Image: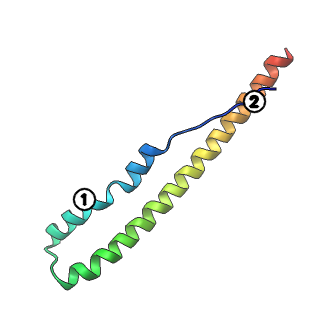
């Protein structure tokens, strides 16, 4: 019996989804000239919203990729079964 294992590294996806959070804060504070109480109120709310949005997007993408990898594994298993039977 053979075992088919399929893996995918999601390191680049993690960097792409979550990596842009930090620099945008500096640009936002500079662009909108936020000071004092505005920074204290807006940045935590913005960070929370951005994190939740990134997390939702990451979850959706990883579920889609998991389905695609499972389909690939099933097709490879079927092909291997056909080749062994032949």
Kindly identify which residue carries mark 2.
Answer: 77
Crowd around label 1: few <14 · some 14–19 · many ≥20 (10 Å): few
Q: Distance between the residues labelled 2 and 1?
A: 45 Å
Q: Which residue is drawn at 21% across and 82% down?
A: 38
**Drawn side of residue 60 relative to residue 78, left or right:** left
Total marks drawn?
A: 2
On-image quarter of the C terminus: top right
41 is higher (above) or lower (below) than 50: below
Q: Name the foreground residue: 70 vs 2.
A: 2
1 is higher (above) or lower (below) than 33: above
52 is higher (above) or lower (below) than 65: below
Labels 2 & 1 near each other (Cβ < 8 A) = no
Q: Residue at x 57, y 45 (%)?
A: 65
Q: What element carries label 2?
A: helix
**Drawn side of residue 16 relative to residue 38, left or right:** right
23 is higher (above) or lower (below) than 75: below
Residue 46 in the image, given as x and y percentages of width and height:
33, 72
Crowd around label 2: few <14 · some 14–19 · many ≥20 (10 Å): some
Kindly identify which residue carries mark 1.
Answer: 23
On-image quarter of the N terminus: top right
| Quarter holding residue 42 | bottom left
Which of the two labelled residues, at mark 2 and mark 1, occupies the earlier sequence position? 1
């Amino acid at each position: 019996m053979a075992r088919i294992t399929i893996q995918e590294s999601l390191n680049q996806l993690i960097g792409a989804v979550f990596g842009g959070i930090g620099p945008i804060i500096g640009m936002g504070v500079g662009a909108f000239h936020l000071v004092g109480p505005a920074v204290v109120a807006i940045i935590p709310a913005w960070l929370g919203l951005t994190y939740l949005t990134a997390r939702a997007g990451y979850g959706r993408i990883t579920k889609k990729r998991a389905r695609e990898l499972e389909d690939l594994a099933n097709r490879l298993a079927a092909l291997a079964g056909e080749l062994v039977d032949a």
